[in-house]
């Protein structure tokens, strides 16, 4: 059963249209990445999917009872605040120590339970956010530029962990990323957004599409040497219209 369906979605802020007639769907167990330049509507799309932004036109449908986990772009915690990772993970609702430990293990950081949030490295902090999103065993995990601020090896390790999470838990992954060299090799499907869906399909198809190259150039093609999934190309699609994003 399709987990999330976006139909003819447009989002406007005042007179400014940031998304126009977007259609997409998320299926169980797949890793989908949204790429696009700054201001292309990536975060607005994610906010519409989780219900934080109301569509101006169109609709977002979710499977009944769908459980969603969310890893934000960034989260500031006062470094003087004494809060352990375990306490942080139970801030919004009560969770057991066992659940915390299992989520941290799935996120690849099983030893952080009693560490102070203020003592974590950037990579550890993002893994703690990932664990918090996983604690209720979501069917879809949404990540909004979750590796912002990490160096390239840290980002690559994080995305490898995301692949492991998808494989171990069976949850679908929808993520926004600007790190094309890493994310193209970790995705089953890529959606190139620039106010509208200008190209969509497997990483290989999108990387060779004129619309993608017009936005990002050809420098990310080499990343596909890392690509190791088998793909169904039936749904590959590139929009060759010259219509500009509103």
Image (cartoon, rainbow, N blue to C red):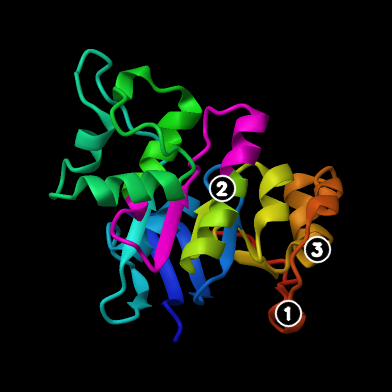
Locate residue 134 relative to residue 77 in the image: left or right: right
Is disc 2 in contact with disc 3, using a CB cutoff of under 8 Å? no
- Is residue 189 something that shows in the picture? yes
- Residue 195 horizontal/vertical position (percent): 54, 58
Residue wearing tag 3: 204
Residue at label 1?
232
Say if 101 sits above or below 152 in the image: below
How crowded pointer 3 is (Cα within 10 Å; few <14, some 14-19, many 20+) is rated as many
Q: Residue at x 36, y 18 (%)?
A: 119
Cα–Cα span, label 2 and label 3: 22 Å
First of labels 2, 3 by sequence position: 2
Residue 196 in view of the camera: no
Q: Magenta segment range?
A: 133-158
Q: Is residue 77 above or below residue 229?
A: above
Give whichever of 189, 94 is nearer the camera. 94
> Depth-wise, is mark 2 or mark 3 nearer the camera?
2
- Of tags 1 and 2, the one toward the viewer is 2
Mark earlier in primary sequence (1, 2): 2
Q: How packed is label 1: few (under 14 Cα within 10 Å), some, or many (20 or more)?
A: few
Q: Is residue 143 magenta?
A: yes
Q: Which residue is mark 2?
A: 161
């Amino acid at each position: 059963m399709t987990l999330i369906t976006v139909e003819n979605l447009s989002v406007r802020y005042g007179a400014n249209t940031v998304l126009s007639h977007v259609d997409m769907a998320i299926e169980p167990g797949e890793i989908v990445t949204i790429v696009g330049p700054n201001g292309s509507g990536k975060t607005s799309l994610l906010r519409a999917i989780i219900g934080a932004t109301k569509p101006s036109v169109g609709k977002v449908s979710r499977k009944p009872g769908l459980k969603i986990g969310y890893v934000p772009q960034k989260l500031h915690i006062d470094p003087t605040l004494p809060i352990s990772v375990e306490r942080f993970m139970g801030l919004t609702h009560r969770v057991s120590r066992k659940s915390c430990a299992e989520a941290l293990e799935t996120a690849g950081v099983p030893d952080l339970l009693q560490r102070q949030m203020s003592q974590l490295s950037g990579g550890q902090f993002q893994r703690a956010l990932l664990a918090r999103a996983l604690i209720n065993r979501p069917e879809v995990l949404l990540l909004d530029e979750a590796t912002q601020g990490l160096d390239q090896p840290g980002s690559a390790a994080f995305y490898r962990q995301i692949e492991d999470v998808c494989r171990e838990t069976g949850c679908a992954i929808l993520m926004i990323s600007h790190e094309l060299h890493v994310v193209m090799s970790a995705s089953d499907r890529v959606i190139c957004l620039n106010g509208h869906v200008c190209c969509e399909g497997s990483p290989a198809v999108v990387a060779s599409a004129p619309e993608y190259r017009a936005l990002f150039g050809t420098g990310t093609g080499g990343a596909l040497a890392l690509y190791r999934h088998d793909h169904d190309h039936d749904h590959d699609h590139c929009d060759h219209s010259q219509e500009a994003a509103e």
